[in-house]
Image (cartoon, rainbow, N blue to C red):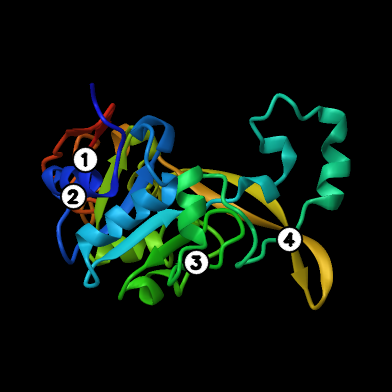
C-alpha cells in the first residue's frame, strides 16, 4: 500500500524528475493531484526549496482574478444583477494581503518567509531565493505576461518550468510567447485602483496569440517542450505518487 507524501519522499521524487541545486524554476501545481501530504502545502514548498538549495530561486503564480470585473469571472454563483454592486465594493489590490486564487500551494508560498511578490493587481508572481528581487522588481501593467514583466525575466534567466499535477494549459511561458506575436489578439480586464487617494477603475490589456502562430524571433515556445523556460528542451515526465509531473 502506498504511503502518503512526506518531505523526504517529495525531495527524492523531485530530484528524480530532474530538479537540482541552483535552478530557477517556475512551478504550476495542484495539491489535490499531488495527493495527501503530511504537512500539506508547506511540505511541498519546503521540498522544492530544499532540492534547489539556497542558490536556487523558486517562483509561483500569485494571480488574483477575484479583484477584477465580475463580468469576466467564471463563477456560476455570481448573478449578473450583482455585478454593479460587486464592482463598487471589490477591494483594491494589496501586495501583502491580497490572496491568490491559484491554489493551496501558491497561497502558502505567498506568505512563506523570504518570499517577494511582483506588483500587479491581477497576475502577480511570487519568488523566493537569490534572484527573487530581480524577478519581481518590474511588472508592466499592460501585456502583463510579456515584455517588462517577471515572465520575460524568467525567459532571460533561462528558468525552468515544473508542472506538478497540471497540464500545459497552466504553463504561463505560453502567454509570454503569445505576447510577442505582432498581430496578437487582445482582451481588456478591469480592476479598482487608487490614484492620489481616489478610488478609480483601472484596466490592463492582455495579449493572446494562437498556438499555431507563435513568434519565431527569440526562442519560440514549443508546446511539447519543457526544460528551460521558453525553449524546445525535452520534457521529462515522472509520477509523484498519484500525479504526473513534468
Q: Which tag is nearer the camera, tag 1 or tag 3?
A: 3
Please report whichever mark, 4 or 2, sits nearer to the chain's N-terminal start.
4
Determine contact: label 4, label 3, CB under 8 Å.
no
Please report whichever mark, 1 or 2, sits nearer to the chain's N-terminal start.
1
Q: Which numbered disc covers residue 92?
A: 4
Residue 69: percent from left, percent from top: 72, 44
Determine contact: label 4, label 2, CB under 8 Å.
no
The residue nearer to you, when weighing 148 against 237, is 237
Which of the image's four quarters has the C terminus?
top left
Q: Quadrant of residue 240?
A: top left
Q: Is residue 215 left or right of residue 236?
A: right
Measured Cα–Cα span from mark 1 to mark 4: 37 Å
Q: Residue at x 41, y 57 (%)?
A: 146
Q: Residue at x 15, y 39 (%)?
A: 235
Residue 68: percent from left, percent from top: 68, 48
Determine contact: label 1, label 2, CB under 8 Å.
yes
Measured Cα–Cα span from mark 1 to mark 2: 7 Å
Tag 1's secondary structure? Answer: loop
How many residues crowd mark 4 within 10 Å: few (<14), some (14–19), many (20+)? some
Measured Cα–Cα span from mark 4 to mark 3: 16 Å
Residue on which disc 3 sits: 117
Q: Which numbered disc covers residue 234?
A: none
Q: Which numbered disc covers residue 222?
A: 1
Q: Which tag is nearer the camera, tag 4 or tag 2?
A: 4
Please report whichever mark, 1 or 3, sits nearer to the chain's N-terminal start.
3
| Residue 166 in sight here | no
Amino acid at each position: 500500500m502506498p504511503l502518503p507524501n512526506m518531505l523526504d519522499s517529495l525531495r527524492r521524487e523531485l530530484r528524480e524528475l530532474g530538479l537540482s541545486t541552483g535552478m530557477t524554476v517556475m512551478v504550476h501545481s495542484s495539491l489535490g493531484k499531488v495527493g495527501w501530504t503530511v504537512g500539506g502545502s508547506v511540505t511541498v514548498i519546503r521540498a522544492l526549496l530544499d532540492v534547489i538549495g539556497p542558490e536556487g530561486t523558486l517562483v509561483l503564480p500569485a494571480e488574483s482574478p477575484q479583484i477584477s470585473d465580475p463580468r469576466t469571472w467564471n463563477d456560476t454563483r455570481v448573478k449578473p444583477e450583482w455585478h454593479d454592486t460587486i464592482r463598487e465594493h471589490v477591494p483594491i489590490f494589496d501586495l501583502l494581503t491580497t490572496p491568490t486564487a491559484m491554489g493551496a500551494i501558491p497561497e502558502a508560498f505567498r506568505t512563506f518567509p523570504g518570499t517577494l511578490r511582483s506588483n500587479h493587481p491581477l497576475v502577480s508572481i511570487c519568488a523566493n531565493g537569490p534572484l527573487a528581487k530581480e524577478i519581481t522588481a518590474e511588472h508592466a501593467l499592460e501585456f502583463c505576461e510579456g515584455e517588462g514583466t517577471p515572465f520575460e525575466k524568467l525567459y532571460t534567466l533561462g528558468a525552468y518550468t515544473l508542472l506538478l499535477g497540471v497540464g500545459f494549459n497552466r504553463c504561463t511561458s505560453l502567454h509570454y510567447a503569445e505576447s510577442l506575436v505582432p498581430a496578437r489578439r487582445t482582451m481588456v480586464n478591469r480592476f479598482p485602483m487608487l490614484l492620489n487617494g481616489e478610488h478609480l477603475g483601472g484596466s490592463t490589456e492582455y495579449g493572446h496569440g494562437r498556438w499555431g502562430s507563435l513568434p519565431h524571433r527569440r526562442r519560440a515556445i514549443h508546446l511539447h517542450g519543457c526544460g528551460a523556460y521558453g525553449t524546445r528542451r525535452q520534457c521529462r515526465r515522472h509520477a509523484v505518487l498519484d500525479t504526473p509531473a513534468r
